[in-house]
Structures are given as structure tokens and as C-alpha cells.
Amino acid sequence: MTPLPPGYRLVDLTEQDALEMMTLDAWAFAIPTDPATSAAGPLPVPWERARGVRDSDGALVASHSSYPYREFPVPGARVPVAGLTWVGVHPASRRRGLLRSMIEDHMSRSLGRGEPVSALYAAEPAIYGRFGYGLAAHEVRLRLPRRAALRDVEGSAELTVRLEVADPELHGPTVAALHAAVDRPGWADRDARQQAAFFHDPADERNGGEALRIAVVERQGTPLGYAFFRRHSSWEHAGPRGTVKVREVCVQEPAAARALWGVLLDLDLMATTEVMSLPVDDPLLGLLVDQRAAEPRWVDNLWVRVLDVRAALAARRYSAPVDVVLEVRDELLAANEGRWHLVGGPEGAEVTRTDRPADLDLDVRELGAVYLGGTSLSGLAAAGLVREHTAGAVHRSAVAFGWPVAPVSSWVW
Ligand SMILES: CC(C)(COP(=O)(O)OP(=O)(O)OC[C@H]1O[C@@H](n2cnc3c(N)ncnc32)[C@H](O)[C@@H]1OP(=O)(O)O)[C@@H](O)C(=O)NCCC(=O)NCCS
């Protein structure tokens, strides 16, 4: 493991370190909230996995932890995934290798717990590729004009939409049940602590908006979906020009999507509805008559690091039969290096070491990128990041690694 610079040491963190950790977090992310307030609020930090770096004076100057996603959805299966989070380095200690040491610490601990994959949501896209994380899921962000036209869906007029202030007691069970029912790669579930933090809505973190609201779409009292949103009013010379900011949308059927968006796109005094974290195949994109008017932007969502090539590739399913020898490069985890024979399909997969010549060669970063089925292996090959040694291997593998449901995480962890 890369040694820390002299004077620094890696330590375990516990709940007793909450104030110090929130002080560090405020420094790392320029958070205006008083750290004591943050430390007292519902904190989703997985303390049992929290690690820090202390300097020679004993001050906490860096931290990281990971969520234990025991059943993280990947194409056709569920896999234990370490969800790297709470990564921060104090600005006075940056760029001297603290993150690198923490990443290596995270990787060896995750492997020790039997987690073959690590995933994260990056504050900045340029940080994690060097550690073998590949861009595995994209999200669409939209800026929709008021009353953006939507195509009709049969049955949507019969559904009702309740608008209420989001309340963990009242809405928590409905949100948890609808969220857990989604079957989409990358759609990480929230445990009780994460759910409490998700609902937590202190007044000084609303950026001038109202308290967090929820729209629940129902058929005769049975919830079929929900959206969290917040309105920001703005009065301009020409009249009201408010913005609705939608935070998470979850729907179980087309009519529910149509009914929900019909309401969110036509709230009085609002001129624009902004939404992020939509999967690239979200139903709203199909419903919009004029997608261009919604100013779609496509950005990175989840980054995936394959920590154990054999276990990770054997755990997921493949859209079509595949029989391919992959030559993998991995600068940080030598056990992944070399040639792997993958034989798989929709029912399962086997991965073994082989001496056979490689059909494809690629860095572990590219393996992470294609792992959730949302990044095209042939697109990576076109960029020179996957090299083909057997004619047709890129095409066949791209079909197998792809997946009909686009990956996304609906929330920033
Ligand atoms: C991003 C952050 C964790 C990096 O920590 P650090 O200790 O300075 O990183 P290291 O010194 O270990 O750098 C490791 C490598 O990553 C590079 N790197 C680090 N941060 C980077 C960034 N924001 N953009 C691009 N490259 C970055 C370094 O240049 C170095 O490159 P090298 O291996 O080629 O020399 C730290 O700057 C930070 O806390 N930033 C604000 C909060 C944040 O963004 N956290 C991440 C949440 S996902």
C-alpha cells in the first residue's frame, strides 16, 4: 500500500468523532451549516466503516466511509457493493496522497468483507478514473418550461395526485416501498439512517426555497409513485417566474408518470421545472412532445470499480450468450491482472483464469464502465479504450454487456 506522508496516520472513526468529521466535511465541501448542527442532525455516516487520517497534532484531516449495499442491483442480479462516501480532505492537507491512501484502504477492506465491487457518486468527474473507477451510469437533467406538452397515457386522468409537506412519519413507508420495488441497475436502496437524512430538511439548507414537498400519485388511495420537490418563488418585472426543483421521482406505471408530471409541470406562479438524476430511459423523455425545449443535459451519475474481476463478472447476467477472453490491466489490484475467460448469458456466468489468447484487452476502469450495462463497450472500443484481437469480439461483447434498463442512482449518496 502507498505509505502516507510522514506524520499522518489512518485511524478508525466512531460516532464520538461526529463533530470533528462534520467540521472537516464543512472545510472539504465549503458547507455553510454550523458543524455542530450537522453533527446533531440525522447523519447517515456508516460509522462501523468510517476511517480517517490524523496529522501529527492528532487533528482529523481526511475521512472516508462506505455504505454496505448488500443487495446492490446490477444487470439481472444483486451484488454486495461498497458504496464509497464521505470522502473529504482538508484543503490544507490536499494533494499529498491522502486520498490515494484512503482509496487503497477502502479497496482492501471492501475485498476483505467480500464486496467485489465499489461504486460512488463523484463530486468531480476527474478524481476517480485514476483509481480504476469507470463511468458506469449517466443521468439526464432537464429544465422544462411551464406546461411542457406531454403525450397522453390511457388511464392517467383517473389518477389523483396529493401534494403535501414531506414528512418521514407519514410518507416514509410509502417512499421506502415504492423505491425498493424499482428493478434498475444502480438504483441503490436507502437504509433507515439514509432515509432519515434524505427527509431531513433544515431551513438554512433550502437555498431560498420552501420546505420539501412530496407529490404522491394514487389510484383509489393506492400509491403508484411519488416525486419530492421544492418551489422557489421569484417575482420579476414581467410577473412571477418561480422554479420547481424536483429531487427524486419514482413511478410504477406509465399512467402514474403522466399524471405526476402533468401536475409538476403546471404549478401556479412557476415558470420552470428543473429535474436531475433521471435515467437516460426515463418515461418523462418518452412523454415529452418537445424534448429539445427541455434543454436535456447528460452527465455522469455512478462510477464503478471492479475490485474482484472473477467474482464481479460471474455475479451479473448478460443480455446474450457471451464467450470471450478478456485481458485485464489493473495498476492497483494485481490479482485482477491477466486473462479471464468469461462464459455467460441471461441465466448466469462463469469466469476462470485462462492461458488462451485474449479476444479483447482493456483496463479495469473500462470493465467498471460497462459493468452496469449502461456504457457501450463498442463506444469505448471506438475511443481506443478496448482493443480487439478477434474479429467480432467487440460487437458480441457489447451486446452481452448491454442491458435494456439504463442504470442510475436516484440520489446523491
Ligand atoms: C478530491 C480530494 C478528496 C482529493 O484528495 P487529495 O488528498 O488532495 O488527493 P491525492 O493527493 O491523494 O491525489 C491523488 C491523485 O488525484 C488527483 N486529484 C485529486 N483531486 C483531484 C481533483 N479534484 N481533480 C482532479 N484530480 C485530482 C491528484 O492530482 C493526484 O494525482 P496523481 O496520482 O496523478 O498524482 C480533496 O481535494 C477534497 O476533499 N476535495 C473536496 C471534496 C471532494 O470533492 N470530495 C470527493 C467527494 S466524491
Image: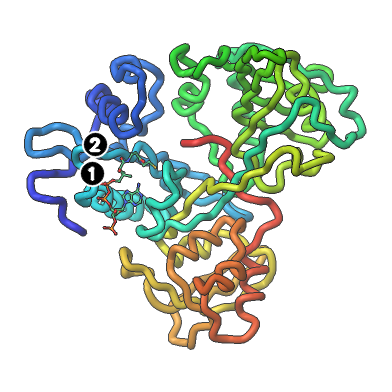
Q: Amino acid at mark 1?
A: Arg
Q: Residue at x 28, y 54 (%)?
A: 104
Which of the 4 image quarters holds residue 171? top right
Q: Return the x and y of residue 385 as percentages of the image width and height.
A: 50, 71
Q: Return the x and y of residue 358 as percentages of the image width and height.
A: 49, 83
Mark 2 neighbour class, 10 Å CA radius: few under 14, some 14 to 19, many 20 or more: some
Q: Quadrant of the N terminus?
A: bottom left
Determine whether the beta carbon of the residue marked 2 sits less than 8 angstroms from the nearest atom of ligand 1.
yes
Is 91 above or below relative to 186?
above
Q: Amino acid at mark 2?
A: His
The reply to whether dot 2 and dot 1 touch (C-beta < 8 Å) is: yes
Instruction: Using residue 168 as the reference point, say whether residue 60 is left or right of it.
Output: left
Instruction: Using residue 159 as the reference point, say whether residue 101 is left or right of it.
Output: left
Q: Which residue is mark 1?
A: 94
Look at the numbered disc 2 and give the secondary structure of its residue: loop
Furthest residue toward right = 154
Q: Return the x and y of residue 13 as percentages of the image width and height.
A: 23, 33
Q: Which residue is mark 2?
A: 90
Which of the 4 image quarters holds residue 277? top right
Q: Residue at x 57, y 12 (%)?
A: 210
Residue 312 vs residue 142, the one in the foreground? 142
Q: Residue at x 81, y 41 (%)?
A: 290
Is 338 above or below relative to 26?
below
Look at the numbered disc 1 and give the secondary structure of its residue: loop
Determine whether the beta carbon of the residue marked 1 sits less than 8 angstroms from the nearest atom of ligand 1.
yes
